[in-house]
Image (cartoon, grey):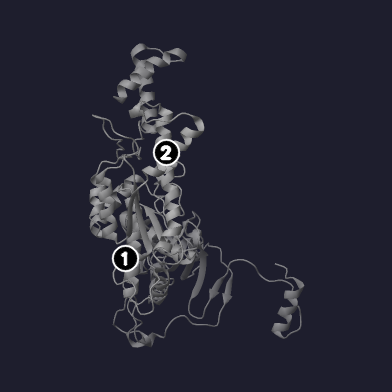
Amino acid sequence: MVLPPIMASAAAAGDGAGQPQLTAPFGDGVLQCLDTTLAAETCEELFTPQAPHIGLALAGVEIISNGSGSHHQLRKLDTRLDLIKGATAKAGGVYLYANQRGCDGGRLYFDGCASVAVNGEFVAQGAQFGLEDVEVITACVDLDEVVSFRGSVASLREQASTAQSPNFIPVDFRLCKPQSCFGASASTAHSPSPEPSTLSPSLAITPRIHRPEEEIAYGPACWLWDYLRRSGGAGYLSPLSGGADSASTAAIVGAMCQMVKAAVDKGDQQVMQDARRIGQYSPEEPIASTSQEFASRVFVTVYMGTVNSSQETRDRAAQLAREIGAYHINFGIDTVVEALVSLFATIMGKRPAFRAHGGSNAENLALQNIQARLRMVIAFLLAQLVPWVRDRKGFLLVLGSANVDECLRGYLTKYDCSSADVNPIGGISKQDLRRFLRWGASALGYPALQSVVEAVPTAELEPLTKGATSQVCVWGGGGLGGRWGRGGLNVSVCIILYVSAKILYFLVEGQVLTGGDCCQGQTLFHVLCH
């Protein structure tokens, strides 16, 4: 590339020759050290079909690094580790993978898990989830093993002979220790740096891959902690209904508090500083003596019941809050609901009624939705004023509890639990949440989660008349996912059943249903539904 005049002049002054440097090479290069070669590829290049590390390895580069910004997704780490392993399994070499960790203030969480692989085997791996800003892992590798590995593959040598040579940049520096520094004692990536006389190549390890349930617990938990400490908030507030979604959100916050407690016990100074500030501890108070004690300072749960709520959901919400240690508030919102309905009646001259009381479908839906929407308004009011009531500073962030199935299908009430400051489960399916609840009952130490997942889900938004059953939402399954809608079948199931009815009628009658014939198909549809 042609250098701008100011840069050309600066280069001339720097080399002492006085002649301006008009051009400079631009592009990728390989550092040619005195004892090895080092190159880099960037982030997503690892995932591409024609990844740079293939050409670099064929050109003889022994060490390839990757500074990545790969965000966390469920079940993604397995793919990432397979690609890192494959980067050196076919062509040999040392692959150094470093990834960002933490939350950058947006919706993404970067899950670290730095790794070192040699000739298709891992010799070091960092933690996928943690509250530390920086984690350093080390490994000792023998570059002669890379040479030996590559020399043993005839087809690799053949392809290397025709590979295009990259730009090599000489560097007057040695990366390797003298041969006399190596002894017989083995060291691991996680042990303290050994004395020079005991250095030896790090042994191969089996990489750790978390279960999806663990990822649901600790990935969002790390994100919530990073987001909280950067936001200046005093904690989180979550409406807790006693159902699966809000219980999942609460359990993730509980996992966050457990991780903070563990980091404090390890003496992490940054976490201790943040925990003291957010928990508003006095200088002489111990920080997070238990995870429940810390949760009581930074997590508020609220059960907002109505005459339609059951004692079972009320009890489940209270039990889970106790196990987590949250500051729990239990109250009814009937007076607010009645005030709004009365306001409508005063304005319009007509008073809506539930279907159970003779009202229309429009009236019934409106009366259900207003309960959910008022809970959102009250949640934000409490988030602003509960710290003041408790003689604490700051504000609380409201947590949502709408899973990805509901968001994709539109199966939610606008401006209810789908409206919040942050939603930890917004990218997680209902089936994964169900498995997470079963796992968390024992792994997180919250037995109430087991009773939540075993309970029949119910909306509890309509009154029950004698002999009626409550609104039931059944767990979805298979490829359909989701759950049955309020007052009707899941949309995907309805479509499948209706199409099946049309096909069945066509086979029976030998004709295609069009126009007025649809009524016969609809009759069969109702039969299939029942």
Report crowding for label 2: few under 14, some 14 to 19, many 20 or more residues within 10 A (C-alpha): some
Which residue was labeled with disc 2? 369
Asked if 449 appears above or below 123 in the picture, the reply is: above
Disc 1 secondary structure class: helix
Q: Nearer the viewer, residue 161 or 388?
A: 388
Q: Is residue 351 left or right of residue 267?
A: right
- Is residue 141 something one can see in this rendering? no
Q: Amino acid at mark 2?
A: Asn
Instruction: Give coordinates of residue 273: x percent, y percent.
Output: 42, 75
Report crowding for label 1: few under 14, some 14 to 19, many 20 or more residues within 10 A (C-alpha): many
Disc 2 secondary structure class: helix
Instruction: Give coordinates of residue 287: x percent, y percent.
Output: 34, 74
Which residue was labeled with disc 1? 258
Q: Nearer the viewer, residue 84 or 50?
A: 84
Instruction: Give coordinates of residue 147: x percent, y percent.
Output: 42, 72
Task: Give the Cα distance between marks 2 and 1.
Answer: 36 Å
Q: Nearer the viewer, residue 280 or 141?
A: 280
Instruction: Give coordinates of residue 385: x percent, y percent.
Output: 44, 59
Q: Is residue 22 left or right of residue 348?
A: right
Residue at (51%, 81%) from the top-left corner?
34
Residue at (33%, 19%) from the top-left corner?
524
